[in-house]
Amino acid sequence: MNQTEINAENIAYIGLGSNLDAPLIQITTAIKAIDLLPDTTVLAKAPIYKSKPLGPQDQPDFYNTAIKVSTSSHPEMLLKLLQHIEITLGRVKKRHWGERCIDLDILLFNNEQVNLPHLTIPHAEIRNRDFVLKPLLDICQDLTLPNGEVLRDLLQQCPCNNLQPATSPTD
């Protein structure tokens, strides 16, 4: 058994994104569903931000946030649970970096590094996404990656993606 399997209080940070089917409602619904997972509690929620899409530009703007959770699940189980929520909420992957009604990503899990074909923690693109870094820093200003990189420093070096606070459901 590894440390993750026996630790009843793993701390994970999850990124949430949406740009279809009432994105703010999709994100709120996903957070509620995560909080209902077995032995999982949402501890903190960042504000929701709006940004231009990274991929194809012929899609609506994205809404993104991050949450901090306590969970007894190990990373692969948490991933399966999050994927089940995505499917339940109607996610269909249409194209790489394309539009979606909900996207749930494990950004950080304890201070662990995971490199599997289907799961990379910390999230592989965390350094390049202000819409991930800013919400994480809203939750915890002192977050670091397992290799010691300070997220606050990474945000200063991160490409700008026209990140703005989301202000209303009609944004």
Image (cartoon, grey):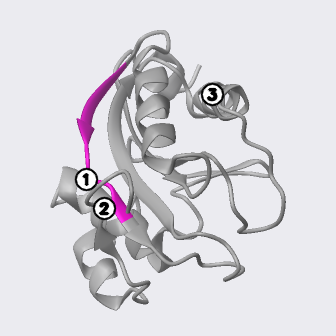
Residue wearing tag 2: 166
Query: Alpha carbon of mark 2 to alpha carbon of mark 3: how far?
Result: 23 Å
Return the x and y of residue 124 as percentages of the image width and height. 59, 66
How busy is the neighbourhood of tag 2: few (under 14 within 10 Å), some, or many (20 plus)? some
Can you tell which quarter of the image residue 143 is in? Answer: bottom left
**Which residue type does callout 3 highlight?**
Ile
Q: Residue at image x 38%, y 41%? A: 110
How busy is the neighbourhood of tag 3: few (under 14 within 10 Å), some, or many (20 plus)? many
**What span is colored magenta in the figure?**
41-49
Residue wearing tag 1: 47
Q: Is the magenta region chiefly helix, strand or loop?
A: strand
Q: Quadrant of the N terminus?
A: top right
Residue wearing tag 3: 85
Query: Could one spot residue 58 in this view of the protein?
Result: yes
Query: Could one spot residue 15 in this view of the protein?
Result: no
Q: In the drawing, what numbered circle is on residue 136?
A: none
Query: Alpha carbon of mark 3 to alpha carbon of mark 1: how far?
Result: 21 Å
Question: In this view, which residue lies farthest toward the left?
Answer: 141
**Which residue type does callout 2 highlight?**
Ala
Please state which of the two labelled residues, at mark 2 or mark 3, is closer to the viewer: 2
How busy is the neighbourhood of tag 1: few (under 14 within 10 Å), some, or many (20 plus)? some
